[in-house]
Image: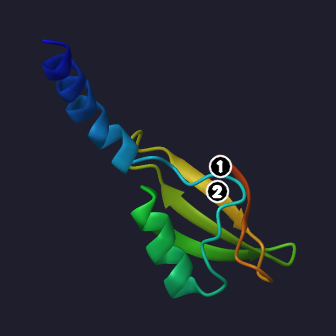
Amino acid sequence: MTRTLLLTLALLAAPFAASAMPAVGDIVGTNADTAKAALEKAGCPVNAFESEDGKIEAICTDAATSKKMDITIDPANGAILTIKGSND
């Protein structure tokens, strides 16, 4: 009984784990193709890239909520610096 319950809970949680948003500090890459692939894999398909204040800004859509997000990426090391709701 306990085993069945645990398996059921694990199966129910799997779609949420697969669509988890990227987090600050994640390395997504320093070029558009690599960053786009990493963000899409993390559940945030990229709509566009922009340059802002010497940083890369990826505008993507959170697959779980359908909200647009602005993700700022450090061009030197490909790390995510900030994640916030998009004004676009």
Please tell me which residue is depicted at 23% across the width and 30% down the height of the picture: 12
**Way the structure is coloured:** rainbow
Kindly indicate whether the residue at mark 1 contacts the one at mark 2 (C-beta within 8 angstroms): yes
Residue 22 picture quarter: bottom right
Q: Earlier in the sequence, mark 2 or mark 1?
A: 2
Q: Amino acid at mark 2?
A: Asp
Residue 88 position, x and y percent, is: 60, 54
Residue 28 picture quarter: bottom right
Instruction: Return the mark for residue 87.
Output: 1
Q: Name above or below for residue 2 compared with residue 14.
A: above
Q: CA distance from mark 2 to mark 1?
A: 8 Å
Residue 5 picture quarter: top left
Please tell me which residue is depicted at 52% across the width and 83% down the height of the picture: 34
Q: Counting other residues with Cα less than 10 Å from the Cα at mark 2, is it few (<14), some (14-19), or many (20 or more)?
A: many
State the residue in front, 67 or 34: 34
Q: Secondary structure at mark 2?
A: strand
Q: Provide the residue designation for mark 2.
A: 70
Please tell me which residue is depicted at 38% across the width and 43% down the height of the picture: 17
